[in-house]
Image (cartoon, helix red, strand yellow):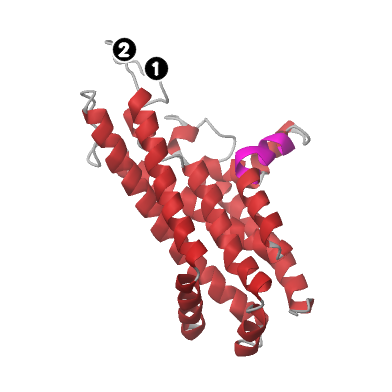
């Protein structure tokens, strides 16, 4: 398995679009943090007039990180099908689920690493801009490390969503569109078509229960607890990957 993961890592590094997408994710996190910090204002009494607390301002927009890391995950699958390299991949690993597992393991590592860098870049850039407004924010502030970890985990989970979509569709354009549109727009539209009590179980909505700023100070901001929300999200991932893996095992690679 280690050899398969190493091979996947080498393939990923050799694809310029994947590296470029990683840089885009970091750039977007910087952009959102800088813009949010630039327009942030608090009145003399200390009540916030924009996006909650200063920590929220330097959060780097984890939903967009989720979406673009999902694209990265989908490309791990779809690029091989579009370029025809999936055939030698399966010849090297005749048990296709082993090949898929190696991609999932690489995706997890990439997701955590890129999401963490994105949050750190956003935090640093946002804090720098806020300092020009005499607003101080640092990793030593109460709740800062917790929010950093939560946002990193939230964003990193996007790469698994992308892998699941990639395995299901195996078509680059369709997978990219779904990965970007679902967390940003389509899930909100889908929630209008399902019973109100079921909305909390949609994948991205369930995962937001992980975030303290969504849960609120008393933990009542989301119908699901953090643990339940994460469990629901991973249940979606397991089901989607299982369905996609079933058809992938029977699909012609030519």
**Percent of width and height locating residue 101:** 58, 74
Callout 2 secondary element: loop
Q: Is residue 178 left or right of residue 10?
A: right
- Check disc 1: other Cα within 10 Å, few if <14, some if 14-19, many if 20+: few
**In terms of depth relative to the viewer, which is nearer, 183 or 212?**
183
Residue at 31 percent across and 41 percent down: it is: 123
- Quadrant of the snapshot with the C terminus: bottom right
**In terms of depth relative to the viewer, which is nearer, 7 or 111?**
7
Q: Are marks 2 and 1 in contact (CB under 8 Å)?
A: yes
Region of the chain picked out in magenta, as a range: 182-190
Q: Is residue 152 left or right of residue 165?
A: left
Q: From where the camera sits, is residue 210 visible?
A: no
Callout 1 secondary element: loop
Residue at 68 percent across and 66 percent down: it is: 167
Q: Mostly what secondary structure, the magenta segment?
A: helix
Q: Is 51 rendered above or below residue 49?
A: below
- Residue behind mark 1: 49
Q: Report if residue 80 lies within the magenta region.
A: no
Q: From where the camera sits, is residue 162 visible?
A: yes
**Percent of width and height locating residue 97:** 65, 78
**Percent of width and height locating residue 250:** 79, 78
- Residue behind mark 2: 43
Q: Is residue 234 left or right of residue 130?
A: right
**Percent of width and height locating residue 43:** 31, 12
What is the tally of numbered marks visible in this picture?
2
């Amino acid at each position: 398995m280690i050899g398969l993961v190493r091979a996947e890592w080498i393939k990923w590094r050799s694809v310029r679009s994947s590296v470029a997408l990683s840089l885009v994710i970091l750039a977007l996190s910087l952009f959102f943090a800088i813009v949010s910090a630039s327009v942030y204002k608090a009145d003399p009494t200390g009540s916030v007039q924009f996006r909650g607390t200063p920590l929220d301002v330097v959060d780097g927009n984890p939903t967009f990180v989720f979406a673009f890391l999902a694209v990265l995950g989908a490309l791990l699958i779809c690029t091989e099908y579009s370029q025809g390299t999936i055939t030698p991949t399966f010849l090297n690993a005749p048990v296709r689920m082993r090949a898929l597992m190696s991609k999932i393991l690489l995706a997890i590592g990439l997701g955590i690493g890129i999401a963490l860098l994105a949050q750190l870049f956003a935090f640093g850039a946002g804090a720098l801009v806020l300092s020009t407004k005499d607003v101080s924010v640092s990793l030593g502030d109460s709740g800062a490390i917790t929010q950093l970890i939560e946002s990193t985990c939230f964003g990193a989970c996007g790469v698994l969503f992308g892998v699941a979509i990639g395995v299901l569709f195996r078509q680059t354009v369709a997978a990219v569109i779904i990965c970007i549109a679902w967390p940003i727009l389509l899930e909100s539209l889908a929630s209008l078509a399902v019973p109100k009590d079921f909305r909390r179980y949609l994948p991205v909505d369930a995962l937001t229960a992980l975030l303290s700023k969504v849960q609120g100070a008393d933990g009542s901001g989301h119908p699901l607890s953090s643990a339940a929300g994460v469990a629901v999200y991973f249940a979606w991932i397991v089901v989607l990957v299982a369905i996609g893996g079933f058809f992938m095992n029977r699909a012609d690679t030519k």
